[in-house]
Image (spheres, rainbow, N blue to C red):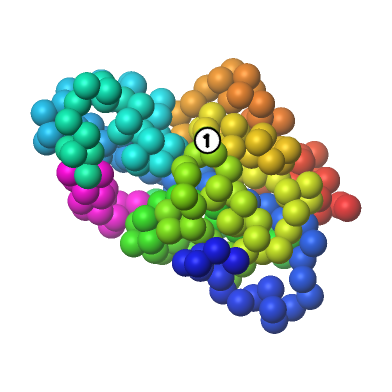
């Protein structure tokens, strides 16, 4: 298990689960995709960059450093990147009390866990942000492991954070499904040959998610939960 990965120890207290589900958090389980968009927009403006929110939103889901590098010109003074990252963190932190789980998120995690699957949060959020997200989710009883930005050298669309989450629950990519809301999620999982179930609740269209390679697309956690038996997760539960 990579250094820094938060593991609850539950797998050592019960029979190891050979199959699992990895979940992105921001925009997938927590309604925070547009909060991040606003936080980045404000952070850019504080450093003198006027980046349209529509462009920012399309990059949400990448790691922060990759997002900044994707949205700003190469000719910039890159020493400002650290200021932008810090400003985003500060702005996003002011929204912690407003974070809310998407409808059905906790119930979906519970159903997967109670069905015998290992459940991991494959998040690249900062450790302090992840704590706020988990508090809003209120589902720790159904989570076996969770990753943060400390656990990956490279951010999505690179698969590092997914590899860390798989190692944390001791599950092979061939025995897992990933659930996310951004094309970067789908691309990262595809690198490992792991199918992705995608949600449109993060603001990305079904067409874009399917084009990226998502095997199934749902409106959000409740929609997937209502159709779980016929989904890729349902196949894991049945198998």
173 within the magenta span:
no
* Image coords of residue 228 (percent x, y): 73, 44
In the structure shown, which secondary structural element does the residue marked by tag 1 occupy?
Answer: loop
Quarter holding the N terminus is bottom right
95 within the magenta span:
yes
Residue drawn at x 18%, y 39% is 79
Specify start and end residues of the magenta stretch as a single range: 83-99
* Image coords of residue 100 (percent x, y): 39, 51
* Image coords of residue 61 (percent x, y): 44, 37
Residue 228 visible here: no
25 above or below 6? Answer: above
Q: Identify the residue under disc 1.
A: 157
Q: Residue furthest right?
A: 239
Q: Quadrant of residue 180?
A: top right
Q: Quadrant of residue 131?
A: bottom left
Left or right: where 10 falls relative to 96: right
Residue drawn at x 32%, y 30% is 69
72 above or below 141? Answer: above
Residue drawn at x 78%, y 47% is 174
Left or right: where 168 falls relative to 36: right
* Image coords of residue 45 (percent x, y): 14, 31
User: Which of 170/233 is in front?
Assistant: 170
Magenta stretch prevailing secondary structure: helix
User: Which of 130/72 is in front?
Assistant: 72
């Amino acid at each position: 298990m990579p250094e820094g990965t938060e593991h609850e120890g539950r797998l050592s207290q019960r029979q190891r689960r050979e199959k699992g589900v990895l979940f992105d958090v921001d925009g997938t389980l927590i309604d925070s995709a547009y909060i991040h968009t606003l936080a980045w927009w404000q952070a850019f403006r504080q450093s003198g960059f006027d980046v349209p929110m529509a462009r920012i939103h399309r990059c949400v889901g990448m790691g922060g450093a990759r997002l900044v590098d994707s949205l700003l010109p190469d000719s910039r003074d890159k020493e400002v990147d650290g200021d932008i990252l810090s400003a985003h963190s500060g702005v996003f932190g002011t929204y912690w009390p407003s974070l809310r789980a998407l409808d059905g998120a906790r119930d979906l995690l519970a159903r997967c866990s109670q069905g015998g699957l290992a459940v991991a949060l494959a998040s690249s959020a900062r450790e302090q942000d992840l704590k706020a997200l988990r508090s809003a989710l209120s589902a720790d009883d159904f989570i076996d492991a969770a990753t943060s930005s400390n656990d990956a050298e490279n951010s999505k669309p690179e698969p590092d954070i997914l590899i860390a989450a798989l190692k944390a629950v001791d599950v092979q990519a061939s025995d897992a499904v990933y659930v996310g809301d951004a094309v970067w999620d789908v691309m990262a999982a595809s690198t490992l040959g792991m199918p992705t179930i995608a949600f449109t609740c993060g603001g990305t269209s079904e067409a874009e998610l399917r084009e990226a390679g998502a095997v199934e697309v749902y409106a959000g956690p409740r929609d997937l939960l209502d159709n779980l038996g016929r989904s890729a997760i349902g196949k894991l539960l049945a198998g």
